[in-house]
Image: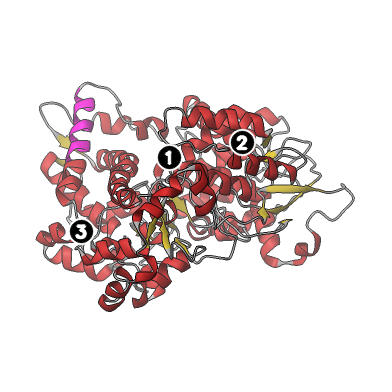
Amino acid sequence: MAFMLKCVIPSSFIFMILCRSVAAGTTPAQWQQPQPQQSQQKLRSAFTTLPDDPSQRLPSLLESALGVGNGVREERLQKLHAKLSPTWKSLQKDRYGRVGFKSLCYLVHRYFTQTYSFFISGLEPQRASQSVEDIIILTESAPHYVSLLANKASRQGFSVDDAVVMVLLIESLLRESSIQGLSAVYKEHNVSGTVSLGKSAQLIQKYMVRWMLMAQPQVLEAVERDPSMAAATFEDWQGLQDLFTGTLRNFEHFRDLGLEGSSSRSNSRSSSSSLSSGSPMMRSFSMEDAQIVVADISQSFGSFWGTRCMDVKAKLTAMDTGKTGRVKLVKFHRAALDGDWRLSESKEYLRALGALDESSNWHGPRVIIPNYLQAISNCIITTPEYRTCCPNECESHMDYLEEAVGGPSAEPNLLVSLIQNLTAGDEQERLTSSMQQQLLNIAETHGGLVQLHSRLFAQWLHFIFPYECAFPHLKGATQERTPQEYGFEFMATFEELKEHAHSQNVTQNTTSNASTGTAQGMDDWMTAWSHEEELLAERLQAPWENRFGNHIKSPLFLFVAAVLSAMGVWYGKSALQEKTELPMVMSHRGKSHYI
């Protein structure tokens, strides 16, 4: 979807109102990134001392990072542990049951994408290298905290508690950032104390519009100058308004009943003050109430945007007569000529995004549906700190497999059985004899077991679930560049659209394409298969070897190590050296290697 003037709305975790525009170097003064001095004061004392008793470390870490009386309830911690547990169990660990930094990032990344459709910069598993410095929300919002961690470098790995702390810390920083942004809106309108439902809805709506258009300051300025332009800017403006108002009225209903009724409230600090700020007779709302409503909207925004993504997916799927998860570029650009401007990305931009399959001369260039939907071009909000994108439907399949396997690897027969459960009732047979043989071949490269978090298995899953699981390219083979970063060439010209739409090279009879749905055809459309492996794993190393090798001299690495140490997570001894990471996305041929 090439988002032009008429933006389709964002999705996700609105705790984070980041205050810096991607498209411009400056933003309105009230939207400059706030410096959370209070957080830095809390973090300044973090991890200076830790209890010797491991069972007391998590409470101590939470208190240090989020403050005394942080409101993180035991129920919340249990739910978070339960959410992280299946993926945690599937990660490769050292003999002390710990993982490396990249695996920690992957675990936290999975949490935010699954929970909020939220991609936090620095956590993505596609990155060739990772460090705490890459997690911009930490380096920008808690610089003193990061520098403090740099002095606490250690050689140990991470526990699941460390992932819990990182999740809660990032959520806390995002929440504080959103409070700053909402406070700015209230200040502009000279609002203090409580306001009516209508006024509260107006303030929340203004806040949300700023969040959605923060990367487009010129459009934001025009909309704030003339609010009626919102309907022309957002494709489903009425749906957005219904979402804002409905969430506010839902909050009002629960408050009138004297119930919390808010998932965000039960997950964060106590909001007793907001419960007493209004009554059924007064119908007044404080800024604390508005903060809770915004948090609730954020948690439903992922599903709101997801439905828009699924509309595009349905349109692309209808064009795929061969049921391969691919749409010929001729059909893709013909749809753009017919009026669906969202399908107007240029051939070159699609290639850079990794959304174009050019492996078959017979079929010609084809757009890979899940790669296209999950591409950065379809992220509604894109900033240096985070982006809000279409949901990754492959996550539910991975969740099922991780929970059923309960470890980092499995025998091919077990995986075949589990996939049969997932595909039961499907019209099209995906587990053909050739696909089962491919799985056996993958297992042979790892001593008879299939690594769940490997490129080859991700590739195999793509051909089993071609509409849900993205094709995994090799690290470095694609470019994550927004349309603004790519330049005007991100969109095909009218002449290019006509040329591609009428290209004879890709206008083969549809029956030949449809034949790919058969067992014989599956081998034909799998021309993109490659045999090079990439792993989300660690390489064993003797305790007397230098754990970090030559990287130990790197200032960046020292910085990363320090961050992790200060979080109190590198305690204990480890015999692992983490060398690569690539779970669900990458490709090529030949050998298994570590990066």
Is residue 250 part of the magenta span, yes or no? yes
Image coordinates for residue 255, horizontal then vertical, percent: 23, 27
Q: Residue at x 69, y 55 (%)?
A: 561
Q: Residue at x 56, y 33 (%)?
A: 401
What is the span of residues highlighted in magenta in the rendered image? Answer: 245-256
Q: Quadrant of the N terminus?
A: bottom left
- Give the amino acid type for the residue marked by disc 1 in the picture: Thr
- Give the amino acid type for the residue marked by disc 2 in the picture: Trp
Mark 2 or mark 3, earlier in chain: 2
Q: Which residue is mark 1?
A: 115
Q: Residue at x 67, y 33 (%)?
A: 410
Q: Is residue 501 left or right of residue 125?
A: left
Q: Please, is residue 347 above or below residue 169 in the view?
A: below
Q: Please, is residue 589 above or below residue 265 in the view?
A: below
Total number of numbered discs in the rendering: 3
- Give the amino acid type for the residue marked by disc 3 in the picture: Glu
Local crowd size for mark 2, using a 10 Å CA cut-off: few (<14), some (14–19), many (≥20): many
Query: Would you say the magenta stretch is mainly helix, strand or loop?
Result: helix
Q: Which residue is mark 2?
A: 88
From the image, state whether disc 2 or disc 3 is nearer to you: 2
Q: Residue at x 36, y 52 (%)?
A: 511
